[in-house]
Image (cartoon, rainbow, N blue to C red):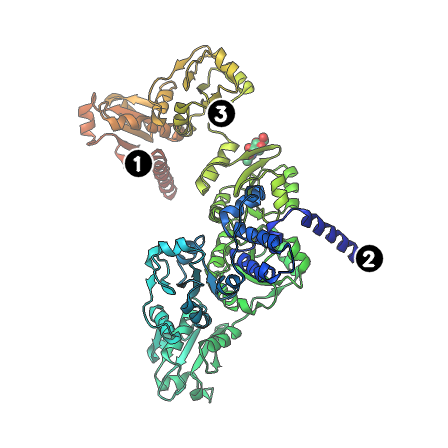
Amino acid sequence: MKHSIYVCVLFAFWCLVQADKPADYYNLLNIPRDATVQEIRKAFKNLALKMHPDKNKEDPEAEQKFIKIAKAYDVLKDPTTRKQYDLYGDEEFKNQKNKYHSYTYYRDHFGIYDDDPLITTLSKNDYEINVLDQSQVWFVNFYSPRCHHCHEMAPMWRKLATELEGIVRIAAVNCEEDYALCYQLSIDAYPSLLYYEKDSHLYDGEKYRGPKTLEALKNYVLSKVNVHIEEIDPDKWNQLKNKEWVIFFCSTVHAKCPDKGTIKEVAASLEGLLPVGIIRNIRLCEDILKNDKWYSTYSVVFWQIIDGTSKSHLIEYGDSKQILNQILNILPHPPSLDENQFQDLRTKLRLGTEKPWLICFYLGTARELDLELKRLPSIIPTINIGLIHCGKSSALCSALHITRYPTWAVVKDGGAFEIHQGRDVLHEIAAFARDSTKSTNLHALSPSDFDHIKDAGTPWYIDWYAPWCPPCKKLTPELRRASQHFEPDTVQFGMIDCTLHNSFCSKQGINSYPSMILYNNSVTRRFSGPPNEAEIVAFIQDVIKPVVVNIDDDSFGQLANKPVDELWIVNYFAPWCRACHLMELEYRNFAKSVTEFKEIIVAKVNCETYWEICNNQHITGYPTVRLYPMGSKGLSSVAIYNGERKAPAFKQWALSFIPSKVETLDEHKFIRAVIDETNLPLLVDFYAPWCVFCVHFEPQFRTVAQHLDGKVKSGKIDCESNRLFCGNQGVTAYPTVRLYLAPDKYFTLDQQDTKSIINQVTELLGSRENAHDEL
Ligand SMILES: *[C@@H]1O[C@H](CO)[C@@H](O)[C@H](O)[C@H]1NC(C)=O
């Protein structure tokens, strides 16, 4: 007892601390920090009706109070201002003037559909991402709360949403609040109804022009829905009877065969889960149901296969929803897990003795999730699916920071836990489960996890995000893919939800979402490129092993004392110099292109920071690129670059200073090399000095030769000086690259790029070895 009072006092203190902050907008509206726009609107409407000054005439402060919540609503409903508020508080909005509407406006006109669970209210911020979905059909009602017809139509629109649930997503746009969107889509009358097929474009919505009755609207949608219903005859049945089916018996004795619309609704709702067929042949009906003497009074059967044996379930006649519910009830439910089972499966995943799990954390009844839950196993067969009731396992749910219901999350191989941030729509959940279980190196983290990590000594790449922020959502799949490029002992990946851990994030200096930072003991590096897989991977690789060495006072010592077998190329630059910026990427690409050449070290000096180094070297202009060649120690000899500031030109220049692995051949040397088998296999570049492409190709060929050094010898032949010989060899184009395995056995290679040549050679050598083995 004492214990709980203590907690309660603590909690009250926390409440006080929170309430003491001036006007936290989330508290004012009494919503969680990760509330959806829908929830924000609903919360505001409720408050507006309670707190409106017209209703609170005796309270002299009513107007001030109301203005506060109206302002909170204004700021939070728009993702841009909401983000500003999350990051910087209300400074920005302090002096903003707020108007408000009359009480009747909030009562009658403020969003007709906000309280309808089956009708999604869309706004300009989320319209595209929803309606342009590849796997959903949408029917959208553009209305104005001031239009009388729109109000009249509302009950029917709700009924349509109920009847077509699972077949089409029913939505609404309030043109009073989102005028720009309605204008953009040329909505010229209220209500206007737009129908979007799966995977369509913004302007592909088809305007519905038929009568606005429930029957007509339903028929319209069903006429558009494209589902296959198999006509089953006795021959086909022989092939099909080993699969699960929902079968409609529609022979002449089946008076209760549902109408076409109902069959189509059932089929559309079950799409991807169970196929639907119709049997019209009386004999076949009798045959199939010979054990059920009531077969002629039933006309719907769920043909289930359990362990290879069929079982027929007679389904009571009803409308499509009733039929569907009976079928779903028969399908097995995913198992419910308790806290121990959860810990147990996580342990097994850590040990690698378990398939990954997709878990739905919920409150209330799981029934609302039936369709999603029961469809999932067919879509993601390699992932276990389970349920956790957060009322019963509240300690677990709070430890995992589950704050909204349902929340979908996965536990991956290795035990990493990740929460789904997208919408609770079947295909999104399935895609999340598939992608995220593959990214075993990406974890959802809490502040205490983060504190552990920082001292654990292994590098972590952390994404600080807010679940509602659109760029964050786009980033997540990229981050998942990026995480798959690295082993956990090189770098691990984490995500921290800054709406849950708001103050922690600001304490860590996070000032925008998403922020990605690489933590490696005391060293932190912030990612600042375009947030996609390739850039993230390149960023981390560059931190692990920079392609361009950043010279500071220490590493300059290394250069000043460089041994004779190293070649250094140094870019002396200044951060403010435009030509330096233009060159930066080329220089980096150059550095990447010479990684094969271990003797080459590419570096740069920031002359603003290390001005003494640059002064001592008498650098007078930026950028200055200098080369300290092999064969000389330290800075004793220098070459200065004055060519084109492009990667291939840098490379050609640099390579001209190091001995080549490519031997220069002529006819006689070639013949000797090929006949003397110790020089085989031999890779040969036939070129002409006047061929521009050959000149560009040369450094690439050197890279190949360098890479393959020890496996093959490499040479080049100038076909201008050895014209007759090249002609005799059948070389007709320059450059031509051949791999000689024997004097009379060669392969002409495709010379797209260094990688492809290396691959071809490796493959040819491999196949030769296998051939030897067979001998
Ligand atoms: C982390 O730091 C160590 C030691 O400085 C370094 O060897 C390693 O490459 C770094 N890893 C990453 C991912 O930054």
Judge whether residue 268 can be spotted in this image. yes
Residue 254: which quarter of the image? Answer: bottom left
Looking at the rendered image, the disc whose residue lies closer to the viewer, 1 or 2, is 2
**Mark number, residue 2:** 2
Q: Amino acid at mark 3?
A: Val
Name the element at disc 1: loop
Residue 257 on image: x %, y %? 39, 83
**Mark number, residue 752:** 1
Front residue (pair 251, 14): 14
Badge 2 crowding class, 10 Å Cα cut-off, few under 14, some 14 to 19, many 20 or more, is few
Name the element at disc 2: helix
Q: Determine the CA span between mark 1 and mark 3.
A: 30 Å
Judge whether residue 32 can be spotted in this image. no
Circle 3 sits on which residue? 549
Q: Residue at x 21, y 31 (%)?
A: 731
Task: Describe residue 576's horizontal placement relative to residue 505 as left or right.
Answer: left
